[in-house]
Image (spheres, grey):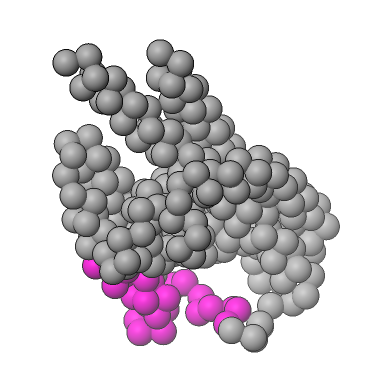
Amino acid sequence: MREALDQWDFVIAAYSVGVLGTLWLVGWSWLGMRRAEARRDKAREK
Amino acid sequence: MHGFANPARFLRLARVLTLPMLLGGLAVACAALVWGLAFAPPERLQGETVRILFLHVPTAWLGMGGWTAIAIASLVELVWRHPLAGIAARAVAVPGATFTAICLLTGSIWGRPAWGTWWVWDGRLTSMLVLLFLYFAYIALAGALSREGGSSRIAAIFGLVGAANIPIIHYSVIWWNSLHQPPSITMGNSAMAPEFLWALLASTLGFSLIFGGVVLARMRMLLADIQAEARLRRKVQARR
């Protein structure tokens, strides 16, 4: 028996993985940088 | 290069470049992916799934390029004791690991309709999986050395030794029989049709800018952590 594969399902799955992974990386790195710089500025003020 | 050995000078440049690189990269990558999804034609043999190319190939190149950057920064750290080289190597590890993971996942999703299987233990896929584990080991090692105050030279040596995997990944499809196709693009030569090639180059430019922006953001984060810790240490010593 040959299973029917919709090629677009695979394309959408791959794009979801790629886009979500990239957005997570950018967001996490940006927020980590902002938090670290705020901690440093706070340490300067003390 | 030695001009940027001064963290203050580096930070001035990084503050100007980080956000434009991230936003510019996201815009270019988004445009390239929309181009690949909506305007690139289906391929004669692979049909619609060829569109996965515009994500899979740039992330594969950047995963390998990331470790090459770690190896170069490690060499600079070991030979010239450049103060930012170790920080740059640590900053590259997380985006390198993320893009390698995206490459493996999108490759697996592409493999199911193209080869009839999600995974095979052939040279290309296995050596790419080894690269992901090398990234995990490097992140754990560099983090532990930083927390425990160990020498960053150990992580630099690991970065250099791990670079042996990069030519193995590149030549795996030539050395061994593989389901994975040989490279379509080599230095100055392409076997790819222009309607795919231009979208691929645009996507590569976008993801490269994102990669660069993330590396700058992570370098700024690591430098800020070091500066905050040094300041707190000085204050504790001054109170004694």
Residue at 79% x, 61% y: name it. Answer: B40
Q: Nearer the viewer, residue B236 or B187?
A: B236
Q: Is residue B173 magenta?
A: yes
In the displayed image of the protein, which residue is found farthest to the right?
B39
Horizontal side of B32 relative to B76 (left or right) equals right
Res B37 visible: no
Residue at 49% x, 28% y: name it. Answer: A37
Residue at 42% x, 76% y: name it. Answer: B170
Q: Nearer the viewer, residue B6 or A11?
A: B6
Horizontal side of A20 relative to B108 (left or right) equals right
Percent position (x, y) of residue B43? 72, 68
Percent position (x, y) of residue B61? 52, 65
Q: Is residue B151 magenta?
A: no
Q: Is residue A37 above or below residue B39?
A: above
Percent position (x, y) of residue B7? 45, 47
Percent position (x, y) of residue B41? 79, 64
What is the number of callouts on the image? 0
Q: Is residue B81 above or below residue A33?
A: below
Residue at 24% x, 19% y: name it. Answer: B238
Q: Nearer the viewer, residue B49 or B11?
A: B11
Q: Which residues are magenta?
A: B159-186
Res A40 visible: yes
Horizontal side of B131 relative to B104 (left or right) equals left
Query: Which quadrant is home to the C terminus of chain A?
Result: top left
